[in-house]
Amino acid sequence: MGVFAAALLAAVFAVVSGCAGTAQGRGTSVYSSLKTEEVTSQDSSEASALVVIRYPAMIHAKAENLYVSSFAINAIGGEVPYGVYGNRQTSRVAQSIIEKSSYFAMSLYHELKGVLPEGSVLLSPHIIEWNKERNLYSRPILGAEQIPSVLTIDFNIYSFPDVNKLMDAPPVTFGDLVTPMIVVKSSRWIQPSLGGLLISSPQLASSAWRQVRVETDNSFRSRLDDTPLVSDSSLDFISFLRERDEVELTLPLKGGGDGNQNMAAIEQYSLEKIQMNGEIISTLPENHSVDPFVQAFVRGASTRIVELLNSLDHEKATFFARQAALERFDPELARVFFVRSSDESVRARLQLAEALVGAEREFLAAQSDSIYNGTYVGSYGSKMRNIIAAEFRTLEERRQLARKQNITTAVAVIALAGAVYGAVASAASTAAAVTSAALVAGSGWALHETLETRTESKEVNRYFLARMAPAFDRQMSVQMEWLESKEVITARGFAEFRNKTLSLYQSRVRSMQVSADQQCRFEHPAFGASGRWYGICENGVASGRGYGLIMNARGDTLEFIGDTYKGLASGSGGMIIQRRGQVGARYYEGEFKHGVPDGVVRIEAPGQVPRTRLYKAGTDIGKGDEARLQSLNFALNSISAGPLAR
Amino acid sequence: MNPWQKVIIVVALFLLAAVSNVSASTNIEDINALPPGEQYRQLSLILLISGGADPALLDALAPEDSEGQGRAISNLSPDDYKTPLIRIVDQESMLSGAAFLLRFARESNDEIQTSLAAINTENPVLISMVDMNAITEDAIIIRNAIADAISYSNLANDEQITPHLQNYRTQTIRIRNILEFELFDEELDKLTDEAILSVGGKLDAYQRMFDEEVNSKDLDRQFDAAKYIFNRTEKFDEKAGILTEEIMKNVILSQSKPNNP
């Protein structure tokens, strides 16, 4: 009996404490302590953007069921009972992630747009879709991702699927609480050992890495076989949801404030449930001049983005994306691009081509502004602010109830436990005995109020979501209608624009004095002679500047950009070697001879600080002199010739 | 208009100009006496002609000690080089005149730049109307004439001169490319502005559609209803009370069962 009573008491305490949370979050993000800095100007192509923000904006009807169940299965912050999977509330929360990501992404866009040069920040809304081959995936609605960019930010907010846990610890986005998730990537050549993955929310890191690997493999295959690129540019959050029982990889991670920032590792942005300013939230519908999300998260995050932009070589970050952009409309120039020729005929053609991509960037920047106006400033934003404020009132109500419950619970629990014990002991008319015992103890009122409060608060939560559901549905469908028709019209507008600019381009380009053979061999002493070379070619083998790739029988891959002689890396360059089955790659930059490092070389490996070493015929023979290192220069010779003598 | 059509027109115009004996000068004082627009045109032309002319090329054309000879034909103005007549008939005069012109441009570079800046500051509106494309087209014709004259002369056999001449020609191609790029960029800007404008207009339409759809009374009623659930009436409390009593009794009963299996 004693054991039973103790167990009962423990159970009662567990129930009570479980419901007594107040759904609090951090006041500000970890990024808020960063010191703001000006963005430094760097030489970069007018074709390139600095940041593309990707976010989930809509979902296709076919993908909804799988999206919701994947959302419940891959819950972050705890297990979700199977019974909750099919709940209407779970579906609502899953949908609200798309709606609110669209809304909060606008804050990030607006803040970055304010600190970065005009037209350098683009929005890339995604639609979530499903098909048999690809399972759940997302694709960009607009053309922003075809524009070369120094950084790509995947942004979404997160909310735990089980609404019954709203008042507990899980990550939530509801009312004044918001849990942002980000993945920041750049070109693979910026951090070759980790595929250009720079920052990630830890929960997304493994799937983001797998996604990077898939993209790299696809790009490698396409170049090696000279076949069209099969791209999967799904949002990292969607890639994460798509996965089932994938292993958590041991990736090299580092904290944002770690001393050793030079280490080749993915910076973690820990999952933060941030509590925005309640006073501002409560008046949002009437006044949105102050964005509470900017104060709580966005300002700090954009400071970190500016820091990153200042620390990266923009030419290096956009080199391959620029090549891919050229390939769409001028394959001949795209091949020659790898040569990094200073020939006037190449410079002139490249100037025209980059101006063309630059015009597309301008167009898409204007389109991004329109999306911002439509989503944040317009009616959608206004309705979202109403919803957030209403959610906040609900949450405040629940917080008050929870606080009230804490006071009353202490007395009630004792009364309840005592009453139960008494009832069990007498084994007669238990209900009456309990009631009378509780009343005698003077805590009947307290018990009643406590249970009422508990029930009511839980019901309020359910009622709210259930009653709000039609509103959410409508918001969702309108948003979809809006974006869908927008997609059709802007896509048509964009296609028309592209046709016009392309015909202008074609009427103006002149022939080039430099060529890069389509069939040219690239070799490596350990990988064999089956590689492909894009660059200067003599007698069918690489001989001069360009880009080469090769794969051995095991499936290990090697990429090289730089100078070659008789088919082998020779001179200055950079080489990425990815061994099959290994997490991360090894990167060498410096001097090469007969295909292997020879001279002063910088080495980057996952989880290590890059080192400068001296190599002789591929063998590390000691420390290298940093001053003698020949860094790979991705800058093309003065693409912009400047104005005439004016 | 096709750039080559433009060139043909420009050449035709300059032929007419040559016939009408419109004069130009390579003396900075003489140039200063001209109206500001013409000053600007001639100084810009001189700078454009001289770009990429290495000292070695200048020396080969006319050593510095033969400057007196150059001065003797200094009345040959940049515009004279555009006339086919001089290019065909008097190659030697043209070469020595070119040597003088290029050297003059090199030695007076700072002065020319200062004059250009001053004219620009004093006459911003007038200078904004100067047709730089026409000046550049003239410069290209003149540069080609000079380079061709060198090619046809004995200097072409001098191997040391060949790379310098090639450099001068490359610079001419660069100037042509820049000119073509500016024309291309102008058209591209026009297309981009039109496209952006059309997107903006269409978005207005979306916004109207959105307003009509979202601001429906129906939606607002739903929204109000959602807020209304927080208004706990007496009846709500009563019902909730009865419900919780029942739940409480059931919980206690279920927990009491171990003694009554």
Image (cartoon, grey):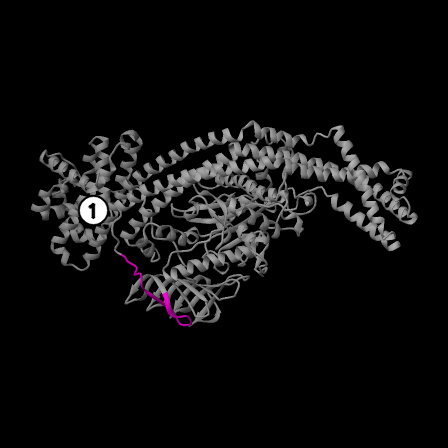
Residue B167 spot, x, y in % from top left: 23, 53
Q: Which residue is mark 1?
A: B103
Q: Nearer the viewer, residue A46 or B73?
A: A46
Whether residue B43 is visible: no
Whether the magenta-drawn stretch holds residue A34 is answered as: no
On screen, A561 above or below A418? below
On screen, A565 above or below B153? below
- Residue A282 lies left or right of residue B53; in this view the side is right
- Residue A439 lies left or right of residue A545; in this view the side is right
Q: Nearer the viewer, residue A139 or B38?
A: A139
Residue A506 spot, x, y in % from top left: 27, 46
Residue plotted at (33% across, 37% down)? B191
Residue B143 spot, x, y in % from top left: 19, 46
Give the crowd class for mark 1: few <14, some 14-19, many >=20 residues within 10 Å. Answer: many
Extreme top residue here? Answer: B217
Dividing the picture into quarters, in which one does residue A49 lie? top left
Whether residue A213 is visible: yes
The secondary element bearing badge 1 is classed as helix
**Dot 1 falls on which chain?**
B
Residue A239 spot, x, y in % from top left: 53, 53
Residue plotted at (26% across, 53% down)? A512
**What stretch of residues is rendered in magenta?**
A514-531
Q: Quadrant of the C terminus of chain A?
A: top left
Disc 1 marks a residue whose amino acid type is Arg
Extreme front residue here? Answer: B261
Q: How many marks?
A: 1
Q: Nearer the viewer, residue A594 or B84?
A: A594
- Residue A282 lies left or right of residue A614; in this view the side is right
Dividing the picture into quarters, in which one does residue B139 lie? top left
